[in-house]
Image: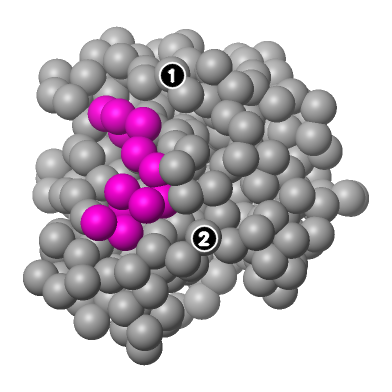
Amino acid sequence: MIVVTGATGNIGRPLTQALAAAGRQVTAVSRHTAAVPNGVRHVVADLAEPAGLKPALAGAKALFLLLSGDLHAAGARPADIIAQAAAGGVRRVVLLSTLGVVTRPFGPTRIAMRALEDTLRESGLEWTILRPGGFASNALWWAESVRAQQVVAAPFGDVGVPIIDPADIAEVAAACLLEDRHADRVYELTGPEVITPRRQAEALAGALGSPVRFHELTRDEARTAMSQSMPAELADDTLDILGSPSPAELRVSPDVQRVLGRAPRPFADWAARNVAAFR
């Protein structure tokens, strides 16, 4: 049995599908009732209460651990989830971390995530740590403005990073859960190229078959918009990365190729698969 947390999201959903397609028994964990593939067991649980995971972990041998935002908050104890997994007989944990633990290690959320990585390493369990950079799916922030006005509004229009398709993260996670060769490894996951917001808008236009205009926001305008859906500190942190990526944040990692034997998908591929969200 393999347990997938965050099973209804951009990574958890395709991961659950891949594991089920591979013929494995899967338990999908999410906060709310949701549709899951045929043959997959679904358990509603809140990771902020690790004791509630006990029914989901019963009989499990592997766990994909994806933390929701509140598990990075002050007072959260995500290390308890690893302890609960070990106590329940889980042997392997694949943790979704972030590239920021090495590129910008001093932010509060990255300090907490690095501590969780250390806890996992010291747990006695088999482990694999995945550190993705920015997600292609962050482009969904623009879906409403593209639908209504055919506009992508973003700061730093000509500054890019090698964003990754969440489907590639899911495929890498599936390999790490299923194959012994990935034990005790850390993988940095990026897309195949540095791509700017302006070029993302062009890719969306190509997928839609209609023009999409790019409008460059000032940093202050972007901060105001982002602060409506995230803490101001996190908005500033994100804007620092988007506006002035470090050499490490610009690096295209070979790790997707190493794990999957193929190059990561470009942003245009993600745009084509998700074009309905922008129509």
- Label 1 vs label 2, nearer the camera: 2
User: Dot 1, how many residues are within 10 Å of its Cα: few (below 14), some (14-19), or many (20+)?
Assistant: some
* Residue 1 in the image, given as x and y percentages of width and height: 33, 43
Q: In which quarter of the image is the C terminus?
A: bottom left
Q: Give the range drawn in magenta.
A: 191-202
Relative to 183, 260 lies left or right: left
Residue at image point 41% right, 81% down = 144
Residue 245 lies in the magenta-colored region: no
> Would you name the residue on which mark 2 appears?
216
Image quarter of residue 235 = bottom right
* In the image, farthest residue toward the bottom: 148
> Would you name the residue on which mark 1 appears?
251
Inter-mark Cα distance, 1 to 2:
24 Å
* Residue 189 in the image, given as x and y percentages of width and height: 39, 28
Question: Which of the pair 59/270 is nearer the observer?
Answer: 270
Image quarter of residue 173 = top left
